[in-house]
Amino acid sequence: MRVMLVDDSKTMRRIQLNQLNGLGITDIIEAEDGHDALLKLSANMPVDYMFLDWNMPLMNGYDCLVTIRKDKQYSGVKVIMCTSESEKSRVLEALKAGANNYIVKPFDDKAIKEKLGL
Ligand SMILES: [Mg+2]
């Protein structure tokens, strides 16, 4: 399983990376904003899951999601929007735009397993 972690916070990416490693997932690509994610996605397909932060510079998670869903070559990428508790109301917007699921930060192992179907 190949996972892409997209978050502008290096600390957050480190935490998520360690959690995924702990669950046996080691094929992980990191990106620091939506634009970086699009570049790395095209270079690293197939990607199975993308954890996509919402608030990021250059291109936010929502715009990145919309761009990904316009491109048929990425139809197999399952996008999990990462929200803070206060952003939960925006989840519906993301699901309408083609997100497969969402997860509230900070993640816990149980939530990650559930979202990845482990
Ligand atoms: Mg952010």
Image (cartoon, rainbow, N blue to C red):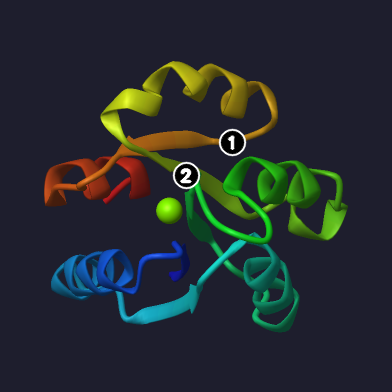
**Residue most toward the front?**
57
Between 36 and 51, the one nearer to me in the picture = 36
Between 70 and 60, the one nearer to me in the picture = 60
Q: Which amino acid does label 1 sit on?
A: Ala
Residue 79 is left or right of residue 96, and the answer is left
| Pointers 2 and 1 in contact (C-beta within 8 Å) | yes
Residue sitting at 82 percent across and 60 percent down? Answer: 73
Q: Name the residue under label 1.
A: 99
> Where in the figure is residue 56, as x and y percent of width and height?
53, 55
Q: In which quarter of the image is residue 12?
A: bottom left
Q: Helix or strand or loop: what does disc 1 sit on?
A: loop
Q: Name the residue under label 2.
A: 80
> Where in the figure is residue 68, as x and y percent of width and height?
75, 51
Between 4 and 86, the one nearer to me in the picture = 86
Q: Is residue 46 above or below residue 83?
A: below
Q: In this view, does 108 lie above or below 16?
A: above
Residue sitting at 44 percent across and 62 percent down? Answer: 7
> Where in the figure is residue 30, as x and y percent of width and height?
47, 76
